[in-house]
Image: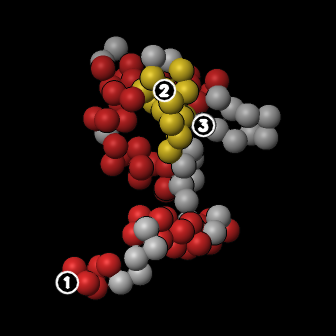
Amino acid sequence: MSCSASWTATANLATVLATSRSGDKMRFASVAEVKNNLSAYLNRAQKRKEPILVTHHGKPYALIQPISEQDLEDLGWDDLIGQRLQQAWGGEADALYDYL
């Protein structure tokens, strides 16, 4: 069995094992796999609308999940960005303009 065939078999097994009660599938990938193929994993998550659980030494570590503009709006992302910028500038609204 070649390396790519072995990876495919392992990935398929992980997908089958991660099938939830609702029938959604989740792929598993190690930190090393994601590090070496980040673009491919991001594309896969976005195109297939498939979350990918990143593991470190076999334990959950991070989640790659597709997100849309509507998801960001639903989360109040604009408000959060405004709050973080205000915190970063410490209330100095014109600090950037004074610098320029």
Which of the colour schemes (rainbow, by chain, secondary structure, one colour) is used? secondary structure
Which residue is located at x 34 percent, y 27 percent?
32
Q: What residue type is labelled 2?
A: Thr
Q: Quick one: SS at disc 2?
A: strand
Q: Nearer the viewer, mark 3 or mark 1?
A: 1
Residue marked by disc 1: 100
Which of these two is toward me, 5 or 70? 70
Residue 78 visible in the shown view = yes
What amino acid is found at the position of numbered circle 1 in the picture?
Answer: Leu
Q: Which residue is drawn at 39% across and 24% down?
A: 7
List x then y, in percent, for residue 14. Answer: 56, 25
Tag shown at residue 26: 3
Return the residue found at the far right. 21
Q: What kind of element bears circle 1?
A: loop
Task: Residue 9: tell me if it is visible.
Answer: no
- Assign a secondary structure to mark 3: loop
Quadrant of the rendering where the N terminus is positioned: top left
Residue 28 placed where, x, y %? 52, 30
Under mark 3, the amino acid is Met
Q: How much space separates mark 3 and mark 1, taking CA atoms?
A: 48 Å
Q: Earlier in the sequence, mark 3 or mark 2?
A: 3
How far apart are the two marked residues, 3 and 2, measured between alpha carbons? 12 Å
N-terminal-most mark, 3 or 1? 3
Q: Mark 2 points at which residue?
A: 55
